[in-house]
Image (cartoon, rainbow, N blue to C red):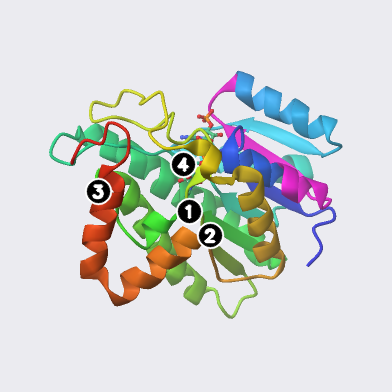
Amino acid sequence: MSLKDKVVIVTGATSGIGEACAFAFGREGAKVVITGRNEEKLSNSVKNLEKGGITVLGILADAASESDNKRMAEQTIRHFGRIDVLINNAGISMRALFEDLDLEVFHKVMDTNFWGTVYATKFCLPEILKNKGSIVGVSSINGYRGTPARTAYTASKFAMNGFFESLRTEVMKRGVHILVASPGFTASNIRNNALRADGSVQGESPREEAKMMSSEEVANEILKATLKRKRDLVLTGQGKLAVFLNKWIPGIMDGIVYNHMAKEKDSPFK
Ligand SMILES: NC(=O)c1ccc[n+]([C@@H]2O[C@H](COP(=O)([O-])OP(=O)(O)OC[C@H]3O[C@@H](n4cnc5c(N)ncnc54)[C@H](OP(=O)(O)O)[C@@H]3O)[C@@H](O)[C@H]2O)c1
């Protein structure tokens, strides 16, 4: 598959993995549509992509809004005439014990990560069916294995995985490719922007970001997997090991994961 003149939408592409995907796909010759909720960040990302010689359209859109997703698909078709690849990347995280968690925070995470994916896929699917294109879900190792103090985030990623397994099978004879990409810990803003129990922003990362895979490396892996029309992508050695062990020794993994996550700075459990 060549990306030359193909149209690729990346949701939540003003930072981290999404922005890196916009660069990676754009450098392959794709026309790129990026979204985000912050006008200033969006216009900075558009400028940076243009400086890199990439044809780009920025659309201010909230992934959690059904009407914004409809407008995103319509505006893309009006502007570029087609949609070939949708990368459902927009996402937020949280960190709090479930017993303390304001349910509004749970809703917000599901609305962005899960419903955002459902809405964007719904409105882009007719074009992607027509063009026999690709849909990518940026899930997580948390789509295979839950971690304590991340109930809403884990639930949103398990829901994404189930949605895409069902949809992939539904369209399997119609030429559409669906990739579920599951990064491990990746350096980005996700932990700075993660929500606490009361919905306030955490404002710092409790982990060593410098030791993680970079967003650019993740984006390159997503690009390669999309071009090869792969079904699943599981990233980082630690992530692959977690998925493997959880399949065979889930009970033992409960203890391993508990102890690992309890070591995070200011962990809400010990
Ligand atoms: N970093 C990791 O360790 C890791 C691991 C596994 C999976 N992931 C997944 O990778 C994806 C990207 O995360 P990241 O790590 O790159 O985080 P990031 O640096 O915080 O980037 C998130 C992007 O999504 C956008 N966004 C957030 N909420 C949005 C909304 N409601 N509507 C539209 N855009 C929204 C943000 O822009 P605005 O805030 O300006 O809207 C930003 O551009 C997420 O789905 C995340 O779950 C990340």
Q: Please tell me which residue is depicted at 74% across the width and 50% down the height of the picture.
A: 25
Residue 16, quarter of picture:
top right
Specify the amino acid type for callout 3: Pro
Q: Disc 4 or 3, which lies upstream in sequence? A: 4
Residue interval drawn in magenta = 23-39
User: From the viewer's perspective, is the residue at label 2 or at label 4 nearer?
Assistant: 2
Give the CA distance from mark 4 to mark 3: 19 Å
Q: Are marks 1 and 2 in contact (CB under 8 Å)?
A: yes
Q: Please tell me which residue is depicted at 63% across the width and 57% down the height of the picture.
A: 222
Q: Disc 1 or 2, which lies upstream in sequence? A: 1
Hey, which residue is sitting farthest bottom in the picture?
173
Where residue 121 appears, x then y in whole percent? 53, 54
Q: Dot 1: few (<14), some (14–19), or many (≥20) neighbours within 10 Å?
A: many
Q: Is residue 75 visible?
A: no
Query: Which mark identifies residue 148?
Result: 3
Q: In front here: 213 or 66?
A: 213
